[in-house]
Image: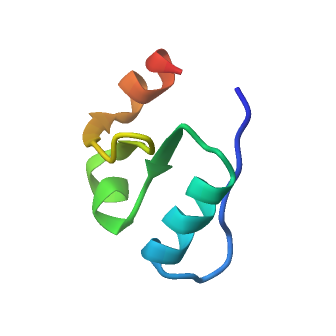
Amino acid sequence: VRCGMELEAKSMKAQMRKAGRSGAETAIIRGDEELKKGTAVVKNMAEGSQEEMNLVDVVRSA
């Protein structure tokens, strides 16, 4: 599994643009709310659909 991580303080929109330009098929998003809940948002970059998932399920689906 190839992975990239954005560490700069950029807007979510800018980060998603960068992920799209990189050719990423999927983006895994963890903000403050997801950290509190132990979840992540998994976004299909081609379709634009996204789903909130438990972290264990994210790892299992990788």
In the rendered image, the vertical position of residue 13 relative to residue 40, given as above or below? below
Report the residue at 49% width, 46% height from top.
Answer: 27
Q: How is the image coloured?
A: rainbow
Q: Is residue 17 left or right of residue 47?
A: right
Report the residue at 39% width, 64% height from top.
Answer: 31
Report the residue at 45% width, 18% height from top.
Answer: 61
* Nearest the eye: 47 or 15: 47
Q: Residue furthest top?
A: 60
Q: Quadrant of residue 6?
A: bottom right
Q: Name the spot of residue 44 as percent of width and height, x first.
A: 40, 39
Q: How many numbered markers are drawn?
A: 0
Report the residue at 33% width, 47% height from top.
Answer: 48
Q: Is residue 33 left or right of residue 14?
A: left
Quadrant of the rendering where the N terminus is positioned: top right
Q: Name the spot of residue 14 as percent of width and height, x first.
A: 53, 76
Q: Is residue 44 left or right of residue 3?
A: left
Q: Is residue 29 left or right of residue 37?
A: right
In the rendered image, the vertical position of residue 19 relative to residue 57, given as above or below? below
Q: Name the spot of residue 9 as percent of width and height, x first.
A: 60, 83
Q: Quadrant of residue 24?
A: top right
* Nearest the eye: 3 or 13: 13
Quadrant of the rendering where the C terminus is positioned: top right
In the rendered image, the vertical position of residue 20 relative to residue 25, given as above or below? below
